[in-house]
Image (cartoon, rainbow, N blue to C red):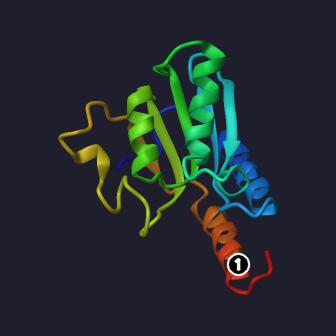
Amino acid sequence: MANFDTDFNNFYMHMALAEARLAYLEGEVPVGCVIVNHLTNTVISSAHNMSQQGNNPNLHAEMIAIDMACKKINNKTLLNCDIYITLEPCTMCASAISNARIARMYYAASDEKQGAVENGVRFYTTNSCFYRPEIYSGIQRLESETIIASFFSKLRKNKL
């Protein structure tokens, strides 16, 4: 895992955090995602988790944002794009990021239970991973962790 260096822009992580807050308000696990064309600094898509309201376990923020971005640019690969995510991707999302060939991944909080980048299966280190983005973690970590902790605390108290 690298630390910030390249063309990281905190503005995009703040957009992803705004998406996470929307998910929180909708009773979804508060994860947000933004995909940016790093050549033009243009936001291609942004999304948040929608698994509960869509009754679909595949509707993670990353999956939705990748789908939207591919449709918008009419291409299955996102070679000139960076992805900003508020939580370490799970195996499904890490694989989708690889398949889309996203150049750089920036994420906020680690996910010890479901994460698949620095935790769990560590997808990008496996032989089944054919493409690995540059990975930068820990960006706005505390803000993301606070939103997630608040969500699960309210969920446990049945207040969501």
Q: Residues within 10 Å of mark 1 (few under 14, many from 20)?
A: few
> Which of the 4 image quadrants contains residue 28?
bottom right
Name the residue at the bottom extreme. 157
Query: Depth check: 114 or 149 in front?
Result: 114
Query: Is 92 positioned to the left or the right of 129 in the image?
Result: right
Name the residue at the top extreme. 74
Quarter of the rendering occupied by the C terminus: bottom right
Query: Is 21 positioned to the left or the right of 108 in the image?
Result: right
> Which of the 4 image quadrants contains residue 153?
bottom right
Residue 132 spot, x, y in % from top left: 32, 35
Tell me which residue sits at (66%, 71%) in the image.
146
Residue 82 spot, x, y in % from top left: 53, 31
Name the residue at the left extreme. 127
Circle 1: element type: helix
Tell me which residue sits at (64%, 68%) in the image.
148
Residue 68 spot, x, y in % from top left: 64, 28
Rendered view: 34 above or below 108: above
> Which of the 4 image quadrants contains residue 15?
top right
Tell me which residue sits at (65%, 45%) in the image.
13
Q: Which residue is mark 1?
A: 155
Q: Amino acid at mark 1?
A: Leu
Is residue 3 visible to us here? no
Query: Is 7 positioned to the left or the right of 2 in the image?
Result: right
Is residue 88 visible to us here? yes
Query: Is 100 positioned to the left or the right of 73 in the image?
Result: left
Tell me which residue sits at (69%, 37%) in the image.
46
Rendered view: 1 above or below 158: above
